[in-house]
């Protein structure tokens, strides 16, 4: 049993702060199948943390600094829940009035106002927090808020670039911090969709950031990291990695729609396999191949067949083919087509940033500097094998000799935690 002197020597504020951190750790790592169980678990931990605060004697809350810390911790604990709590905002507002230099209080107040829907005030709070000195948590939160502000704005791409800038600043402060890398990956992935879902360099940047995040042990409990990394792999057409990632996300958080993403991908792959069998009759392919017309290109590219392409980017060549079939699937982007070249070899063409009706069955397509890969893997005892071409820029495709008009792609599903 502790003696009086031991009790007096206890730092009750530190214990309350540790309890608040434990509460937020639970929030970020506990994903039961029933969301109500998470809320009840958070409430139990929040009550415990508030108990530490209530045990702090009034005489230890006399100075402005002490009262500010008390109000900050109480507000932060109350703000752990996903919905907005006015009581949390009130305590956090008191904290910053009592001690305007308390950056963590400005950060938590910004998060509370974000939940309230007052995004402008939330950004002001985060900017004030950042003015107290460089801080990776604040930079990450500001980066996330900017991505939210980009939705519905007149120039979303510019705002998302600001988000990427702040995400990179957070990484530069601590290159081993997994959450900062994860946030940078989310910023790059958002940029991919905001700019029309065609710039695969953004996807590659996102994938590298997520891979850095995965090196941090604490991030292995984050299901959103697995989901978003799988999303990137899906659009990079790393199908097996994407399926594995979505399955891992579903196991970590049953509340995500990761299992549905797995089923969508399997449905797509099955349709590709089916179209390969039904649309590739020898007589038809011979007729299609003989109907191809040679277009003169205003470039030094050499004509090629898919059988001659290297894995990856083939910048010096162009492939001409005829569209046999439009492969319908559940996602907005990309559009998939079954195409036949002059050697009567069929391949799958994936096109980003265009309306699905921009290319029709029977159209002739010229693919300049194509990105090629041979898809060859097994999933759940089923084998998938086909050749695939992707073009990374709209200027690299001609449809019947003309460049199609771009189309702003809708954002797909991915997840981003926004708790500080």
Image (cartoon, rainbow, N blue to C red):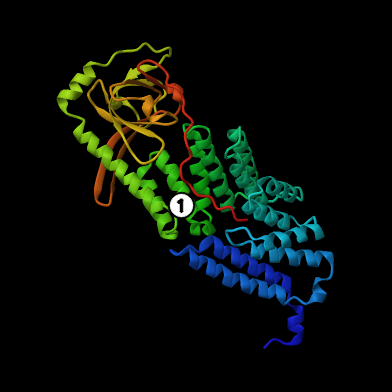
Residue at image position (65%, 71%) is: 49
Q: Quadrant of the N terminus?
A: bottom right
The residue nearer to you, when weighing 403 against 83, is 83
Picture layout, residue 247 above or below residue 19: above
Residue 128 visible within the image: yes
Q: Is residue 397 rendered to the left or right of residue 83?
A: left
Q: Quadrant of the C terminus?
A: bottom right
Q: Position of residue 58 (x, y in %)?
A: 80, 75
Q: Position of residue 308 (x, y in %)?
A: 30, 25
Q: Is residue 250 rendered to the left or right of residue 415?
A: left
The residue nearer to you, when weighing 395 against 45, is 45
Q: Residues within 10 Å of mark 1 (few under 14, many from 20)?
A: many
- Name which quarter of the figure residue 101 lies in: bottom right
Residue under label 1: 226
Residue at image position (77%, 77%) is: 57
- Name which quarter of the figure residue 343 lies in: top left
Q: Position of residue 12 (x, y in %)?
A: 72, 74
Residue that extends furthest to the left in the rendered view of this protein: 283
Residue 99 visible within the image: no
Residue at image position (44%, 59%) is: 252
The residue nearer to you, when weighing 262 against 314, is 262
Residue at image position (42%, 59%) is: 254
Q: How many marks?
A: 1
Residue that extends furthest to the right in the rendered view of this protein: 63
Picture layout, residue 398 above or below residue 334: above
Picture layout, residue 265 above or below residue 405: below
The residue nearer to you, when weighing 96 against 103, is 96
Picture layout, residue 48 above or below residue 135: below
Q: Position of residue 120 (x, y in %)?
A: 69, 45
Disc 1 on helix, strand or loop? helix
């Amino acid at each position: 049993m502790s003696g009086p002197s031991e009790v007096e020597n206890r730092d009750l504020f530190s214990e309350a702060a540790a309890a608040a951190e434990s509460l937020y750790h639970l929030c970020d790592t506990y994903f039961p199948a029933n969301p109500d169980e998470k809320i009840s678990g958070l409430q139990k931990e929040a009550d415990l943390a508030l108990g530490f605060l209530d045990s702090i004697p009034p005489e230890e809350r006399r100075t402005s600094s002490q009262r500010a810390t008390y109000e900050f911790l109480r507000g932060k604990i109350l703000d752990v829940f996903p919905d907005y709590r006015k009581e949390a905002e009130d305590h956090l507002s008191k904290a910053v009035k009592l001690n305007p230099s308390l950056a963590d209080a400005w950060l938590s107040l910004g998060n509370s106002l974000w939940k309230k829907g007052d995004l402008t005030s939330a950004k002001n709070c985060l900017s004030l927090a950042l003015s107290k000195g460089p801080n990776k948590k604040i930079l990450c939160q500001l980066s996330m808020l900017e991505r939210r502000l980009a939705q519905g704005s007149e120039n979303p791409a510019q705002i998302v670039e600001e988000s990427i800038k702040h995400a990179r600043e957070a990484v530069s402060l601590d290159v081993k911090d997994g959450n900062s890398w994860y946030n940078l990956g989310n910023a790059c992935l958002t940029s991919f969709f905001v700019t029309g879902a065609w710039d695969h360099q953004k996807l590659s940047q996102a994938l590298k950031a997520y891979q850095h995040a995965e090196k941090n042990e604490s991030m292995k409990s984050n299901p959103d990291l697995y989901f978003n990394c799988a999303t990137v792999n899906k659009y990079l057409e790393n199908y097996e990695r994407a399926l594995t990632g979505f399955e891992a996300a579903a196991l970590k958080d049953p509340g995500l729609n990761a299992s549905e993403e797995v089923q969508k991908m399997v449905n797509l792959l099955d349709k590709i396999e089916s179209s390969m069998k039904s649309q590739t009759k020898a007589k038809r392919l011979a007729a299609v191949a003989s109907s191809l017309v040679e277009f003169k290109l205003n470039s030094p590219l050499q004509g090629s067949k898919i059988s001659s392409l290297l894995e990856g980017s083939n910048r010096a060549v162009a492939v001409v083919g005829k569209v046999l079939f439009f492969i319908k699937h559940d996602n907005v982007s990309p559009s998939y087509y079954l195409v036949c070249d002059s050697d009567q070899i069929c391949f799958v063409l994936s096109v980003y940033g265009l309306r699905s009706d921009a290319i029709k069955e029977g159209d002739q397509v010229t693919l300049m500097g194509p990105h090629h890969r041979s898809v060859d893997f097994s999933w759940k005892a089923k084998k998938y094998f086909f050749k695939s071409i992707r073009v990374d820029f709209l200027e690299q495709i001609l449809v019947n000799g003309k460049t199609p008009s771009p189309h702003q792609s809708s954002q797909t599903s991915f997840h981003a935690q926004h708790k500080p």
